[in-house]
Image (cartoon, grey):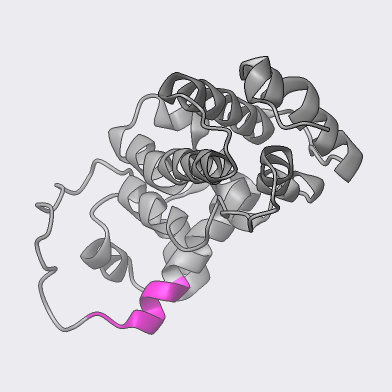
Amino acid sequence: MTTTERPPRPAGARPPGRPLSSELSEQLVAVAVEILADEGWGRLNSDRIAARAKAGKAGIYRRWPTMAALARHALSTAPLVELPADSGSLRGDLCELLARWTRPLDRTERAAASLVGAARHDDELRAGLEEALVRPLAGAVREIAAREATRGRELSQQQVALLGSVVQALWWQRYTAFGPVVMSTPQVEQLVTGVLLPVLAPEQLPAG
């Protein structure tokens, strides 16, 4: 069954029938994430989910009107961006923000990565990536900039926006790179020092 065979349910409308089982909902989401992470968006469909979860397809569509809506919900189940603890410096905070780059993509990250191409043509998937990645990443960059302001080095809105754009571009590159992308801690530090910090005015860079 394709994502368009069933008419979408109005936003906010409650599905008909009995109250939904939260346990089954979690199981369906876990199966969807597994399929996305291991096989990609093109393999996500109600038949495969129902078979793996040993559930009826009606139970899927009572919760999510389309596969894109399910994928969007699945992205919200685990954080793709984590706000780092305050390291005491701009460089340190940015290194901590990118610390997960020293590990392979986890399952939810692989699921998100599988949606990047399709999201260019699907509003639901694009909204899911916006909510799960773009906004949290922008928020993390703003928080890091706010910390720097309390240290006496205030960044302009333009600088914060530019830094956020570069960080986001690097994040997309990590998701779409061919093959696993795992950096060592020194490589992450070099990425911050050689790519991220230079986008700021020299007078704004932390000493040392």
Count how many numbered circles sit on residues in the image. 0
Q: Could you tell me which quadrant the C terminus lies in?
A: top right
* Image height of 92 relative to 196, above or below: below
- Would residue 140 be found to the left or right of residue 176 on screen? left
- Viewer-proximal residue, 28 or 183? 183
On the image, the x and y values in percent for residue 68 come to: 35, 45
- Would residue 69 be found to the left or right of residue 159 on screen? left
Q: Main secondary structure of the magenta part?
A: helix
Q: Residue furthest front?
A: 152
Residue at 52 percent across and 57 percent down: it is 79
Dividing the picture into quadrants, the one containing residue 49 is: bottom left
On the image, the x and y values in percent for residue 144 come to: 55, 43
Residue 76 at least partly seen: yes
Q: Which residues are magenta?
A: 20-27
On the image, the x and y values in percent for residue 69 come to: 31, 50
- Would residue 41 be found to the left or right of residue 198 on screen? left
Residue 1 at least partly seen: no
Residue at 46 percent across and 63 percent down: it is 77
On the image, the x and y values in percent for residue 95 come to: 74, 42
- Would residue 82 be found to the left or right of residue 64 on screen? right
Residue at 31 percent across and 65 percent down: it is 60
- Viewer-proximal residue, 201 or 110? 201
- Viewer-proximal residue, 139 or 176? 139
Residue at 79 percent across and 39 percent down: it is 180
* Image height of 79 relative to 204, above or below: below
Asked whether 177 falls inside the magenta stretch, the response is no
